[in-house]
Amino acid sequence: MIRRIISFALLIWALGFVWFALLLPQPAEGQKTDAVVVWTGGAQRIDRGLVALKDDNARRMLISGVDRDVKPDELAAQYPKYARQFACCVDLGFRAVDTRSNALETARWAAKHKVKSLRLVTHDWHMRRARMELDQAIPETVKVVNDAVRTQPSLLVLFTEYNKYWLRGITALIGL
């Protein structure tokens, strides 16, 4: 009996991994939101958020999880073609250090700016766990659009992220 339960659990885990690895979230093309939120930690995330801002698909942008040593002017200088967007519409969040604190920082920022809809930008392999954390932190009245940056993740990256996703889901279910 126990062997069957363990076998069934492993089968569910393995099928879930196939789903997770083969059906990665996709970019959101042309959808308009009040704001765009970029969670730092990987290449092309900030670029993707700035394009959404420049194309008028959002009015304001938060870059969450910025290192405390980063100066706003220095970061803006790395993106010269987006100088106008940085000057008016980009906020930097320095509190977040992981996915969960990114979600909390985003929720506080969204409440402060009365955001009703936001575009979440992160890598495709990170989107599901990021979205799970954000859904727990932000009111249900805020519409969230996934805007995944496409990557070519290794099997190890997918395996690690899938297990983090499962573990975080289990801890959320039991209230931790």
Image (cartoon, grey):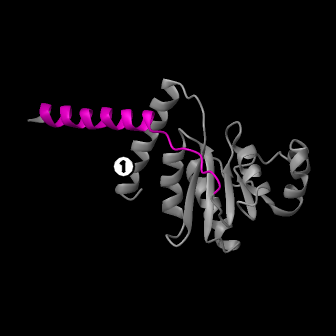
Q: Quadrant of the C terminus?
A: bottom left
Q: Quadrant of the N terminus?
A: top left
The part of the chain drawn in magenta is 3-30
Foreground of the two, 159 or 86: 86
Answer with the quarter of the image where residue 85 lies: bottom right
Return the residue found at the far top. 155
Residue at 75% across / 65% down in the picture? Answer: 59
Q: Amino acid at mark 1?
A: Ile
Q: Position of residue 134 (x, y in %)?
A: 54, 58
Count of labels in the image: 1
Residue at 62% across / 62% down in the picture? Answer: 118
**Residue at image mark 1:** 170
Residue at 48% across / 53% down in the picture? Answer: 132
Residue 48 sits above or below residue 175 on the image: above
Answer with the quarter of the image where residue 151 lies: top right
Answer with the quarter of the image where residue 19 lies: top left
Task: Kindly state the secondary structure of the residue where label 1 is placed.
Answer: helix
Look at the image and tell me whether residue 22 can be seen: yes
Residue at 52% across / 70% down in the picture? Answer: 139
Q: Position of residue 92 (x, y in %)?
A: 77, 56
Q: Position of residue 61 (x, y in %)?
A: 74, 59
Q: Position of residue 18 (x, y in %)?
A: 37, 32
Foreground of the two, 29 or 92: 29
Label 1 crowd bin: few (<14), some (14–19), many (20+), radius 10 Å: few
Determine if the magenta segment contains residue 92: no
Return the residue found at the far front. 30
Determine if the magenta segment contains residue 28: yes
